[in-house]
Amino acid sequence: MAIAEMSKLNLVAVSSERDKILNALQRTRAAEIKTHTVLENTQVCSSSLSELEERIRVLEGALDYLVTGVSGYISDNKIKDIKIESEYSLTYSEFLEAGEKREQIEEYISRITSLEEQKKELEATLLKSRRLSKTASIYRVIKQPFSVLENTTRVVYRLGTMPAQAFEELGKEQEPLFYISKLNTEDNEALVFAAFHKSFAGDKILQGASFNACPFKEGTGESIYNGAVAEIERATDDLRDNADKLFEMREFIKPLRIYCDYLKFELEKASLSDKLRATQETFLLEAYVPKESEQEVGEAIDGVTNAAYYEFTKPAEDEIPPTLYRNNAVVSNFETITDMYSPPSSKEFDPNTIMAFFYSLFLGFIMADVGYGLIMLLGGGAIWLKMRAKGGGLARLSGVFAVSGIFAIVWGVLFDSVFGMSLGMPFKLPDAQNDMWAFVGIKVPAVLVISMELGVFQLFAGYICKAVQCFRRGEIVDGICEGVVWAVFSLGAGFAIAGFVDELNFIELAYAGGILAGASLVMAMLTAGRKEKFFGKFTKGFGAAYGIINYASDILSYARLYGLMLSGAVIAKIVSGYAVTGMNGSVGFVVSGNPLLIVLGVLILIVGHAFNFAIGLLGAYIHDARLQYVEFYGKFFEGDGELFAPLGSKHNYVRLKK
């Protein structure tokens, strides 16, 4: 439950050692280069990025083509024993060795590019041949060369196609100077031969029948069609051979990906030019380094050069170093939820441990079923165990669901529910759908009161966090007035809500809560304007009193816990009711003894609970996050931090061994 304390590395070294030093810092993965302070007689380092960017563009193009081709080949041929790895674990020295393989990589790229160009040519040929074969298909009955069809001094000859229906209509009208004959029919098209006297308007008649003249002048219809078919077969075979050759290059994927990450690291180093300063002979660098990594970073620099001076100092008061979490394996999964809102500033305390507890508590409350909790725990836990080494959003989200699954199981036991069916627990919390409590004489759902009490509990924790944050900065009075006072108010509000429930029969709790809430509210009104002048004191005090409305609104926001929990519980009961326990005195399908009904019951169980689980988990994830962001973090969280991003830490395919 802490954010790492940062030191600032200040380094001066001869320019020729720059690359070695940056490589050493990358190896530690503990130094984030910052923009150097502008100093007199220094200038920004110069560096050209265009060549590197072009090399990366060409490499990524070839790599994408290769991966897409190999993946498609595996899918088309249903090959199950070959998989493309998505990540490669390397030592730092193995990663740097990739830079020595430029000639080999360029050869790979050349071979891939050559196959890509060949494929494009073959696809163009295949498309052209298919179009030709489609056009020539109806002419394949023509055994004589097209060139023999020449007009005489008195007779005009025409060969071409028209709609078959148009030919039938044309044939009904006999003209002494016009002759037409059908030679072939294909796909409602007729191949026709027409002859007419020059004095006769034969072309006009043919045009009216949608006649298309033969596009061929040389060769025979048979030879043209057969040639096109042969070309299609040849191009198809060549494309298959091209795909085989590309598939054989699948071993290139790993070195190409490693080299791609290496080039991007080189680009990252070159891009640092805007952040570094330089003199005629030296360069100057500033970086943020976790305090506990100072020795490691110093040893890494000393290991590559003797021509550097460096020191570690404390960042200035007006500097905001990047945020680096220091949480255990469980809490670290919940960091992604906070980061979606905003990483905390490095000058505030890390709220993830407390937020993780409440997030899991609320998510478990919404699901509140032993069966659903087990799915979350086992399914999420299995994915997390499989993917934790690689990290990433899916692994962390799975960890969140796994931990929340434990809470869902506990709540499921307390609410006596396993897939909507009763566990037969001797003690259980009120039923979400049916049980009502009298709150100040008004009947309200009992679980709604419980959800509001959970909200008061989190608001109490939020104000305690506010006090702790102020105390850490030495703002003792602010911590008491803005944190402790309102925390006491929350405590009183929680007592009062419980005391006003008739079924709990503890009215003394309401009196105690009222006294606590009233006294703390008066204290809040008196201290709200402590930093203001006379009129400001009055308005601030009135604002504190008005804040009760906002507080009540915050508590009501937690009613969403009840609403989401109720909808999931009702659907679960209906699904299990029809399938197993029966509804309205009827027998459940699974226990009916009828084979068809048993199958139907099993389908209802699987589909119904899968749907309810998915929708419930999605809603719980979203609304639970909203409660953390608005109601909880709104009490103390400042945010606007930037996560620690050490040099060379962003790799697409490579995972460096520590």
Image (cartoon, rainbow, N blue to C red):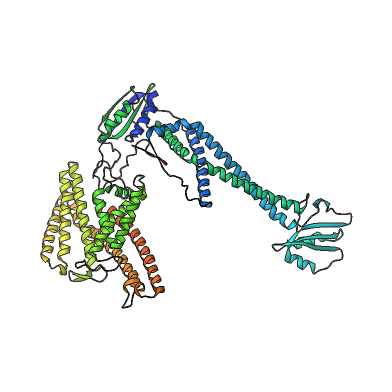
* Residue at the image point whose x is 35% and y is 33% from the top: 27
Q: Residue at x 16, y 69 (%)?
A: 503
Residue 251: x, y in percent? 49, 40
Q: Can residue 533 be spotted in the picture?
A: no
The picture places residue 284, in percent across and down from the top left corner, at: 34, 27
Question: Is 224 drawn above or below residue 255 in the view shown?
Answer: below
- The answer to whether residue 573 is visible is yes
- Residue 380 figure quarter: bottom left
Q: Residue at x 56, y 39 (%)?
A: 113
Q: Is residue 538 left or right of residue 423?
A: left
| Quadrant where the image shows the C terminus | top left
Most extreme residue toward the right is 153
Judged left or right of residue 496, residue 370 is: right
On screen, 345 above or below 585? above
198 or 336, which lies in front? Answer: 336
Rendered image quadrant of residue 4 = top left
> Left of 192 or right of it: where is 427?
left
Is 4 above or below relative to 423? above
Residue nearest the observer in this picture, 546 or 315: 315
Instruction: Give the quarter of the figure containing the N terminus.
Output: top left
The percent position of residue 55, horizontal first and vertical second, equals 50, 35
